[in-house]
Image (tube, rainbow, N blue to C red):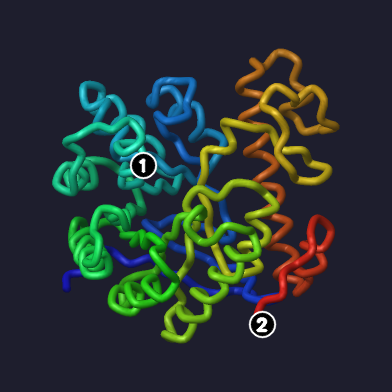
Amino acid sequence: MSRALRANVACLYKSACHSRVNKVDISGKSLLTPCYFPAISSYATKYPLSSLISFLHQYSKTLLVSAYDLYEESDNKNHLEDQMEGMSENIIMLDSGKFESSWFNREGWSIARYKEIVESTTHDLYTSYDLFPTEAGDDFEKQSIENINQSIRMSKRNVCVPIVHVKSIDSVLSILKETTGEGVEFVALPERELGDSIYDRCYNISKIRQFLDSTGLNILIHILGAGHPISVLLYVYGGADSFDSLDWQKHVIDPQDLNFKDYAHLPLIECDCKYCNNETMPYVHKAYLHNLFLMKRILNEVIISIRNDNFKGFLSKYTSPPSLDE
């Protein structure tokens, strides 16, 4: 099989349970994990896509952008492409757009059109064109593997991140067994499908991490739709490495307990970050940047605690770690 460009992934540190720090070198840029990709999606944004990309890339090195949204703004694609080419320091993950096309119930979005966007836009990572379990029936595993392999062949200049939907953990492991060989450095799983409770999700992430480690390859786990800071900490404990979500646009994070508060409640939160202290910044910008600043600060503290082999102690300040096989 013809593989896409590879990323160089090196594990630097390990700590409690399956928590770890990796250095990822991709397209001449470096990234430490655990890390967070703020997602840009027409499902949640208050701004035109081009405006939000233009604003956000100044404040977050990592970004996740929906290919479906880029396709829908095709009349403005040259302008968007000019913007994305100017984001040489950012690490951009292109999402398959299945979420947006399903949410808006738009027909016509297909793997062929996704391939057009993969080939015509500037990015570093792109997800596979994923298959929902309800779309395939009894052939779910076989069709998922075919979609992943077809997606990997889309581009030789970018790194493909296979998405595996969770019909069952056994089906996930079966799909991963067939698709995680040399050249695959990331896999992505939707948070909401990993279990009903946070501990169920941690246990399943841990099981997937142990399987991936058993291959002898250092493969990163990306959790789609995960942006609550407490959840992120627990998933890191279970062995996840990177995350994306729309939460940074929908809530505000309380720095005292790392829980979400109502979007309008930023003035009620005790926070002295430079954005909260800015009296002239529009509220929406203040809320967005407060959230991104806190996520970056939290994950920097996670990386430091793992490096010092004290992640369990750091996690215990906010929540009780689950009982997982270490």
Q: What residue would you read off at disc 1?
A: 99
On the image, the x and y values in percent for residue 140 come to 26, 64
**Quadrant that contains the N terminus:** bottom left
Residue drawn at 59 percent across, 60 percent down: 34
Image quadrant in which you'd find residue 266: top right
Location of residue 215 with respect to 93 vertically, above or below: below
Left/right of residue 314 with respect to residue 300 in the rendered view: right
The residue tagged 2 is: 326
Q: Judging from the image, what secondary structure is the residue with disc 1 in? A: helix
| Residues packed near mark 2 inside 10 Å, few (<14), some (14 to 19) or many (20 plus) | few
Marks 2 and 1 sit apart, C-alpha to C-alpha, by 34 Å
**Rendered residue at 49%/46% (across/down):** 62
Frontmost residue, 146 versus 117: 146
Q: What secondary structure is found at the residue carrying circle 2? A: loop
Q: Quadrant of residue 13?
A: bottom right
User: Tag 1 or tag 2, which sits nearer the N-term?
Assistant: 1
Q: Residue at x 81, y 46 (%)?
A: 257
Residue 176 seen: yes
Q: Position of residue 273 (x, y in %)?
A: 77, 33
Please tell me whether residue 57 is drawn above or below residue 52 in the rendered image: below
Tell me the kind of residue under disc 1.
Phe
Between 110 and 158, the one nearer to me in the picture? 110
